[in-house]
Amino acid sequence: MIIKNISLRNNTGLFTIHIVDHIISKIEKFKADEIYDDNDVIDGEGNLAMPPYVEPHIHYDTLLTAGEPRWNTSGTLFEGIGIWLDRKKSLTKKDVKERAITAMKWQIAQGVQFVRTHIDITDHKLTALEAILEVKEEMSNYLEIQIVAFPQEGIVSFNGTENLIIKAIELGADAVGGIPHFEFTREDGVESVKKSFEIAIKYDKMLDFHCDEIDDEQSRFIEVVAAEAHKNNYGKFVSASHATAMHSYNNAYTSKLFRLLSISDISIIANPLVNINLQGRFDTFPKRRGITRVKELLDSGINVCFGTDDIFDPFYSLGTGNMLNVLNMGLHVCQMLGYEQVKKSFDLITTNSASALNITKDYGLEVGNTANLIIVSGKDEFDILRRMAPIEYSIRKGKVIAHTIPSVSKIFINGTNEVINFNK
């Protein structure tokens, strides 16, 4: 395959990518008059090619269940959890698989090729986990999926969770989860973090905590996670998702915390769409934005990325898995709409996410890497985000797995028939 006439991030001019046996064999300057022997040629028309979008945080087991068995009328995280616990009682493998595969197809069409999903294992039957393990194998040619054994009801506060996590790992889970702020007490939360580390280190697994997903300024489990990561020299395998309480920390404590985060080498995964929906629900006015300190974390050299979290479920009633929607919301809420900030921000859904998931070895448009890439309908990152441009091609292992034809509109003014294409 040859992909010609494309733009590349952080480069000027146009380029041609040569792919041989699903590997990027050569990247060279585009020559308009060159004729290629290869019959499989894609003309990028000057659009931007980049590594695929990486989804670092989504719940495949809960998605597409909004309104079942009831709607979240308060909009709070805690009501959402209660609704999910009721919906969980009726789970079947068929139910979970059908919903997950539907969402995966949406993701594939929108340029996602790498995913980390949190699957609730506080279910002695492990129905959802077994379903997603099957789907992971079935969809492996299109998506690379990591599964987090997520203890939604707590590790210390739910009977038998440690054994369920271990069983999940033995069945094929890739990472150990935790939710310390949801445990019964502060002491239980600290104990749960330590137990998660013990299991992950013993079985050589990654860790990803739902951490301080609350507006309570006293919820400070992120320091416990970071300290354990530092003590065990395990930071590159650890992520703290949400961390929304950081929004409410005083600056003196935050300054101390940032030092610990920096030396711990953990990643922070924010989920702007869901964070802005669930947080601040107990405020009158002023209302907190309820998202972690993204700009300040980035300025301190800490790895930050953005995830979708939920799609049409008890926690978030909208969504299609479009990573540009996630990025758009995050940049607005974090007030990061400067020109250079927007261009750099695509790291939050590509390279930074890849780093959090430890998939950097073969990720990126470099000679010798596997030919996994997307071609987005726009000349650069700013242009793409402004127009919320679609993915024209998603290519995995040198083969096209999704192709979108940008839509056009016709307007009729003063007897004219003019075509408007917002994607060009």
Image: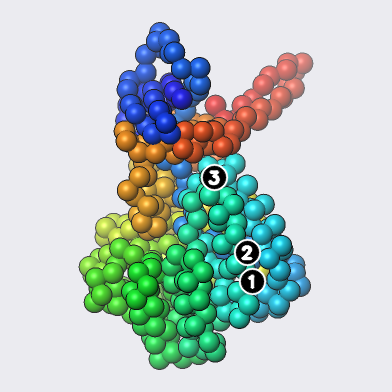
* Residue 28 visible, this orientation: yes
At 60% from the left and 67% from the top, the residue drawn is 130
Label ID, residue 2: none
Q: Quadrant of the C terminus?
A: top right
Please tell me whether mark 3 sits on a helix, a strand or a loop.
loop
Please, what is the three-letter code of the amino acid marked with disc 2?
Ala
The answer to whether the residues at label 2 and label 1 have Cβ atoms under 8 Å apart is yes
CB atoms of marks 3 and 2 within 8 Å: no
Measure the alpha-carbon separation of dots 1 and 3.
23 Å
Count of numbered tags: 3
Query: Amino acid type of disc 3?
Result: Tyr
Amino acid type shown at disc 1? Thr
Instruction: First in sequence, mark 1 or 3: give its number.
Output: 1
Q: Is residue 365 above or below residue 161?
A: above
Please state which of residues 277 and 337 is positioned toward the viewer in this rendering.
277
Which residue: 34% across, 65% down?
237
Which residue is painted at 55% across and 54% down in the image?
137
Instruction: Give x and y (percent) for residue 102.
Output: 67, 52
Local crowd at mark 3 within 10 Å, few (<14), some, or many (≥20)? many
Q: Which residue is mark 2?
A: 131
At which x and y percent is residue 21? 42, 31
Residue designated by label 1 = 127
The picture quadrant where one finds residue 23 is top left
- How far across and down, in percent of the image, does residue 255 sit? 26, 71
For the residues marked 3 and 2, what is the alpha-carbon distance in whole angstroms? 17 Å
Mark 3, residue position = 142
CA gap, disc 2 and disc 1: 6 Å
Q: Sequence-wise, which precedes: disc 3 or disc 2?
A: 2
- SS at badge 1: helix
x and y, in percent, of residue 219 in the image = 42, 81
Corner quadrant of residue 342:
top left
